[in-house]
Image (cartoon, rainbow, N blue to C red):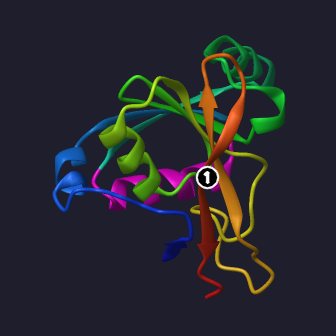
Amino acid sequence: MKFRILAPLILAASTSLAMAGQPVEVLLNEGCMCCHEWIAHMQAAGYTAHATEMDYNALASRKTALGIPGDAVSCHTALVGGYAIEGHVPAALVDRLLAERPDAVGLAAPGMPLGSPGMGADADAEPFDVLLIRKNGSTEVFATVQPDKG
């Protein structure tokens, strides 16, 4: 699936190669299929992903402990390079986060945006924001993504 990043995406040409093999620990609810689709998206981008299934309450507690605000929550949480990645964030934006290394908790694609990685191509998909989660719990737009409508 292809995505256009509408907000500036500044990466060195070698960034994706530098991220190849970077381990990603994905925490997800038992049996969540869209989470496994997102894992496949990350693996296609060169990441090495490992899934840990958790019950709903344990996963919710972990999100809170990681500093993910309630309005940024999605179905799964990933840990990569010292950051939390909440939900269906495109791999290119994880690459950017790891290249820029901001002082932050991580990134979030709140909810489950149609057309985001793992959520399929959909004619009704709309652009969605990926948020940078600051350590104080505030968020700001890191990038706006235009999904490929298939």
SS for callout 1: loop
Based on the picture, tell me whether residue 32 belongs to the magenta stretch: yes
In the image: residue 70, left or right of residue 82: right
Quadrant in which the C terminus is drawn = bottom right
> Which percent across, then down, holds residue 112?
75, 54
Using the rendered view, name the quadrant where residue 82 is placed: top left
> Which percent across, then down, holds residue 84?
53, 29
Q: Which of 137 and 70 is in front in this view?
A: 137
Task: Judge whether 124 appears above or below 83 on screen.
Answer: below
> What amino acid is at disc 1?
His
> Which percent across, then down, holds residue 65?
66, 11
Task: Judge whether 108 appears above or below 128 on screen.
Answer: above
Residue occupying the point 76% across, 37% down: 72
Residue occupying the point 60% across, 66% down: 145
Based on the picture, tell me whether residue 57 belongs to the magenta stretch: no
Residue occupying the point 65% across, 55% down: 34
In the image: residue 72, left or right of residue 102: right
Would residue 30 be seen by someone viewing this image from the given angle? no
Check disc 1: other Cα within 10 Å, few if <14, some if 14-19, many if 20+: many
Magenta portion: prevailing SS class: helix
| Range of magenta residues | 31-46
Would residue 44 be seen by someone viewing this image from the given angle? yes
Give the labeled residue for mark 1.
Answer: 88
Task: Judge whether 89 appears above or below 28 on screen.
Answer: below
Residue occupying the point 72% across, 27% down: 138
In the image: residue 90, left or right of residue 76: left
